[in-house]
Image (cartoon, helix red, strand yellow):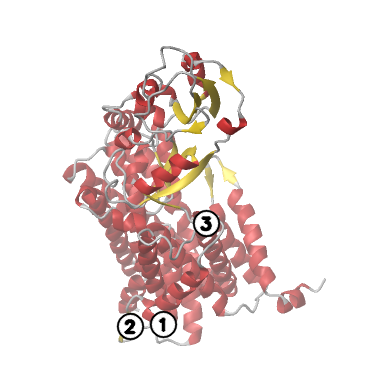
């Protein structure tokens, strides 16, 4: 097979081959550590680019990067805007400290070691593990008033520095949060998390606890009412005796006619009722209501799961315990805030934009949807016209910039698309009929948009990678690695000191905020494993949203500042 001819005729094969090999590299584990698919694809792309030089149009990588940026903004937008309130001030302060501290560290290290613009941009994206900054940095380099060869050289240095520093960006941060800071400040993550959980279990009731009881499979049974213990009792009175098993009367048939089911409805002798709930409830006494009957008509109730987005301002700020009191016939499976699953604790406060996964009958789910906000419109359909319009709008707004010397000042197309996506995601939660992009589609756009962009970046950098490493030598590699370690640690250390000494908040929450601000999802998993609890996720989500925005916008800033000493 003539491989050079194949690549010349079908350059797209190098993209998919880099993605394939990159995912294989990313799956290699040493203990609990792995490079991940992003770094794996970048390394694979560079390697393929060294061997072959595919002719891939620039439009390809930027089109996919635009989709990635829009999807990131769209996904974090609701959480970003809904959490900007007084109670979230500690998390906002810590996030700004971490992100600004990281920016200053990158600029200081790059100036001290006299890194070029490309290496500085790669130092930012790799040490702070924000691949979006790699894209915005390269985009800003392409706007510089330098020759095409210099642009290619600087652009090639970005992924090289990124790949060198990304590994410690992940591993170093986890070690800092799990081992170093807890050891220095005598933090017992398990004890701190248990204290948080205990405070959020306060005033819990059997009703709220049963609301979260999703371990058993729901059951439906029909009975004829014959027991004197149930005749003349309202549904509310009967159901109150079986709260912990979440037993509810879903249908009542009297004389052949179905009654409107309300908590105040009183049962009569001979009524036929449909009872739903967890299986354990049917061995706790409810079966004494009367003989069980087999009736297709009475048992034709379908339990299903529905994702409901919180948008009703009357619900925002309430706790799950309060919500459970109005959750008749419903079971809460999980609650998501952004990409993070939150612990099901009675005192957990509901935020606008939260996604509740509820199980229940269609009627009860419809009632819950009216109270909470709106349900996902169609999980299999995305508003592509809305997406395309937003990307176009962001691109046009990105043209609104000016140059100070050779340095472009402004958001640029990448920053503008991110901001437009941010606003679009926020607006869609208020006007659900327009611009719907379901969660699976968002995730696909984020994954495919970034991975294709990274593959092309690696392929483009490959031809210059060997020359750049040879030119820099061992000393340059050592300098980049050292600078990466410093930049990874400076922001989180400053953020911890602010949270611990100034804000005086729970150290477990502070540590989670640091990981969120540095957009390091592996750090949340590590903290949850070390603490044995999901409660730390409560302080991860808002910093994660802020970090995704600020770190992405830092790309053009470090490019602009680094030109001052070139």
Q: Nearer the viewer, residue 339 or 319?
A: 319
The mark nearer the N terminus, 1 or 3, is 1
Pointer 3 or 2: first along the chain = 3
Vertical position of residue 321 compared to residue 556: above or below: above
Where is residue 57 drawn, in percent x and y?
Answer: 59, 80
Q: Name which residue lies at 39% across and 54% down.
A: 519
Q: Is residue 134 above or below residue 207?
A: below
Q: Which residue is mark 2?
A: 401
With 503 as the anchor, is 260 left or right in this view?
right
Whichever of labels 2 and 1 marks the residue nearer the N terminus, that label is 1
Q: Position of residue 217 (x, y in %)?
A: 54, 29
Q: Nearer the viewer, mark 3 or mark 2?
A: 3
Query: How far apart are the two marked residues, 1 and 3, measured between alpha carbons?
Result: 40 Å
Direction left: furthest residue = 502
Residue farthest along the front direction in this orientation: 255
- Callout 1 secondary element: loop
**Which quadrant of the structure image shows residue 485?**
bottom left
Q: Are marks 3 and 2 in contact (CB under 8 Å)?
A: no
As rendered, which of 259 and 173 lies closer to the eye?
Answer: 259
Residue lying furthest right in this view?
1
Residue at (45, 80) in percent of width and height = 142
Residue 267 placement (x, y as % from top left): 41, 23
Instruction: Read off the residue under disc 1.
Output: 143
The numbered mark at residue 220 is: none
The answer to whether the residue labelled 1 contacts the one labelled 3, judged by CB atoms less than 8 Å apart, is no
Q: Nearer the viewer, mark 2 or mark 1?
A: 2
| Residue 378: numbered disc | 3
Q: Secondary structure at mark 3?
A: loop
């Amino acid at each position: 097979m003539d491989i050079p001819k194949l690549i010349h005729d079908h350059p797209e094969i190098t993209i998919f081959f880099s993605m394939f090999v990159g995912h294989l590299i990313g799956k290699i584990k040493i203990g609990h550590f792995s490079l991940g698919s992003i770094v794996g694809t970048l390394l694979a792309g560079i390697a393929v680019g060294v061997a072959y030089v595919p002719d891939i149009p620039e439009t390809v990588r930027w089109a996919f990067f635009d989709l990635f940026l829009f999807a990131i903004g769209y996904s974090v937008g609701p959480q970003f805007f809904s959490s900007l309130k007084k109670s979230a001030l500690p998390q906002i302060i810590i996030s700004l400290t971490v992100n600004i501290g990281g920016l200053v560290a990158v600029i200081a290290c790059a100036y001290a070691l006299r890194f070029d613009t490309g290496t500085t941009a790669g130092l930012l994206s790799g040490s702070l593990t924000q691949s979006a900054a790699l894209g915005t940095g390269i985009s800003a380099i392409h706007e510089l008033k330098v020759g095409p060869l210099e642009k290619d050289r600087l652009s090639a240095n970005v992924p090289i520095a990124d790949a060198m520093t990304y590994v410690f960006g992940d591993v170093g941060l986890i070690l800092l949060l799990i081992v170093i800071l807890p050891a220095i400040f005598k933090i017992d993550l398990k004890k701190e998390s248990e204290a948080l959980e205990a405070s959020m279990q306060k005033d819990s009731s059997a009703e709220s606890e049963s609301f979260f009881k999703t371990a058993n499979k729901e059951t439906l049974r029909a009975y004829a009412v014959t027991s004197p213990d149930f005749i003349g009792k309202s549904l509310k009175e009967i159901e109150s005796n079986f709260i912990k098993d979440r037993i509810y009367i879903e249908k009542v048939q009297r004389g052949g006619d179905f009654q409107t089911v309300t908590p105040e409805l009183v049962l009569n002798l001979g009524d036929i009722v449909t009872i739903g709930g967890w299986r354990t409830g049917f061995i706790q006494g409810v079966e004494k209501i009367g003989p069980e009957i087999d009736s297709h008509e009475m048992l034709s109730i379908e339990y299903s799961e529905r994702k409901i987005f919180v948008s009703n301002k009357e619900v925002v700020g309430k706790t799950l315990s309060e919500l459970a009191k109005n959750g008749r016939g419903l079971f809460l499976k999980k609650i998501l805030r952004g990409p993070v699953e939150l612990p099901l604790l009675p005192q957990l406060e509901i935020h606008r934009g939260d996604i509740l996964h509820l199980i229940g009958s269609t009627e009860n789910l419809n009632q819950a949807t009216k109270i909470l906000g709106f349900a996902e419109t169609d999980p299999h359909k995305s508003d592509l016209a809305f997406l395309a319009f937003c990307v176009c709008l962001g691109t046009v707004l990105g043209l609104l910039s000016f140059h100070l010397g050779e340095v472009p000042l402004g958001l640029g197309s990448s920053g503008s698309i991110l901001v437009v996506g941010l606003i679009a995601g926020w607006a869609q939660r208020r006007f659900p009929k327009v611009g719907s992009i379901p969660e699976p589609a968002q995730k696909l756009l984020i994954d495919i948009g970034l991975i294709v962009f990274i593959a092309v970046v690696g392929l483009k950098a490959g031809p210059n990678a060997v020359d750049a490493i040879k030119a820099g030598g061992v000393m340059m590699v050592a300098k980049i690695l050292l600078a990466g370690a410093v930049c990874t640690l400076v922001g989180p250390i400053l953020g911890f000191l602010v949270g611990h000494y100034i804000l005086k908040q729970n150290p477990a929450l502070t540590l989670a905020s640091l990981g969120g601000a540095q957009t390091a999802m592996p750090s949340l998993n590590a903290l949850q494993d070390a603490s044995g609890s999901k409660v730390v996720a409560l302080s991860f989500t808002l910093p994660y949203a802020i970090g995704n925005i600020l770190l992405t916008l830092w790309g053009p800033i470090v490019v602009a500042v680094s030109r001052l000493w070139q």
